[in-house]
Amino acid sequence: MDVVCFDILRRAIAALHLAADTGRGLDAMLAGLLGVLADLPGLSQAAVVLIDAEERPTIRASLGAPDVGLILSAALERGPQASVAKVLRRGAEPAPADVDGGVALSREEAAMLAAPLAIGGDGGLGGWLFVDGLLGRQASLSEELRLAVLVAGLIGRMADVAAAGARQTLDMARELAFLRSKVSLRYRHVFSEGTSPALGVLQAGTDQAALSDAPLVLLGEAGSGRGVLARLIHELSPRAVRPFAVFEAGGQGRDVMLRLFGGVRSLGAGAGPGLLETAEGGTLLIEEPHQLPPEAVEGLAGYLASGAFARLGGGRTRPGSTRLVFKAPASGLGLDLGTARPLVLRVPGLRERREDIPALLDHMLSLEAARGGRRLTLTSKALKALESYDWPGNIREMEVMAARLAVSAPEDRVDIADIPPEILAEGERPPILPEDAAELRDMERQQVLNALERHGWVQSRAARELGLTLRQIGYRIRKYGLARDENGESDN
């Protein structure tokens, strides 16, 4: 073996590091290794055959034009001799190597050399390396076969490392999917629990959308949760291990095109991949799609029709598999997407799913409790008032109200008097207040005032007498506008 051959083998061993690159497929790695070995003087035809899970041989990489029939015939052999290095002959049985790896054949009799691949921790037969030669005619057939066995060992090791890397990648992908799912975990309840017919229809559509790769249009009012639903559909789909990106359509035409499709280097600022490319294999949510400039709409229609796009300023098309989701108003998408036929889901507003309001309120108050440590509950009167409200801001408005109550409610039991006044505005106030509500308020006001006067307006003592906290009595003082004037007399 000369210096050149040693250098080729050194490069082949160095090629093992490719297996650690989990972004490359095993087939590409094997093809790269055969490309390195192609510089050996005696190699013109080669093939790597691996056995799949069903014990079927598959050619995973090849060089030149090897005799496929001869190769597969040898790969189908089973029994004790299957894992022994051998010389393949045309019109005759293969000649297995002896215990020292030698064969008593002339070079003219040999069609191909077959070296077994030991793959896995148990060193079981995982495939074969087939070559027509390696070192050239100056080497004996036995030397060629022993070298083929050495190279087969490298390939087996490469397959083991690649398999371990693939398992690690799968574990990381699963962990990433779990971590991403936690981003919207606080919102999942919005679309997972409820008894309204509108929610049942939406859940069925969500399941269908998660199993589809078709573009998706989510119709609904502001605050109804269209963006959250888009993320949930992404997480329920096989795309969950890939990116979820959000594109805001506002801006000038060129800026929109650069952010969406990317730009070539000659453009300078803005060059590089756009969100469509960055989210490859995942989901891209396009907000306010009616603001897209015509050239962007045309580009998206072309992408949906062909599965390819071009960066701004360039002519080379790039394949893509990112799924598009459009967050559109209730009136419709209003865009011409060409031949694309998107799925359409209508996200109902809260007034269309009033049966779900109690569960949603309880969930949001629980989230605020987890954040601030105070668990609020609603009286029946307060709950009935919130069920009767139309919620023009939908889910977003309910979140804001829950956060506001967590700060402003004087007691852990939220009554109708604690609900923000705009929710109980004139014309929307539910007729549930008792007729004697004003009298009850006057009685409570007088009770607080009397306690304060008995204790010289020392709030801590008055609160102790009434069984209230300092915060609660302070709230009632502000609520009823109680104040002590400069002469020490109360404002009664």
Image (cartoon, helix red, strand yellow):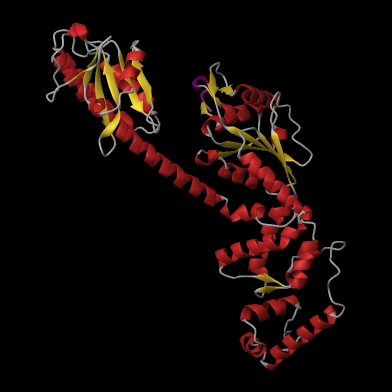
Q: Left of 381 or right of it: where is 276? A: left
Residue 23 found in image quarter? top left
Is residue 266 shown in magenta? yes
Q: Considering depth in this image, is 158 or 231 the residue closer to the camera?
A: 158
Expressed as whole percent of the image width and height from the top left, the position of residue 383 reads 75, 67
Expressed as whole percent of the image width and height from the top left, the position of residue 122 reads 26, 39
Q: Quadrant of the N terminus?
A: top left
Q: Left of 393 or right of it: where is 143? A: left
State whether residue 178 is above or below residue 400.
Answer: above
Residue 115 found in image quarter? top left
Is residue 391 shown in magenta? no
Residue for point 73% across, 71% down = 418
Expressed as whole percent of the image width and height from the top left, the position of residue 254 reads 62, 26
Magenta-highlighted stretch: main secondary structure?
A: helix
Residue for point 76% across, 64% down = 386
Residue lying furthest left in this view? 100
State whether residue 191 is above or below residue 130.
Answer: below
Residue 345 shows in this picture: yes
Residue for point 20% across, 6% down = 108
Q: Quadrant of the C terminus?
A: bottom right
Q: Considering depth in this image, is 9 or 455 the residue closer to the camera?
A: 9
State whether residue 352 is above or below residue 343.
Answer: below
Q: Left of 381 or right of it: where is 233? A: left
State whether residue 86 is above or below residue 392.
Answer: above
Q: Considering depth in this image, is 246 or 459 the residue closer to the camera?
A: 246
Residue 449 found in image quarter? bottom right
Magenta residue span: 265-269
Q: Considering depth in this image, is 283 or 163 the residue closer to the camera?
A: 163
Residue 492 shows in this picture: no
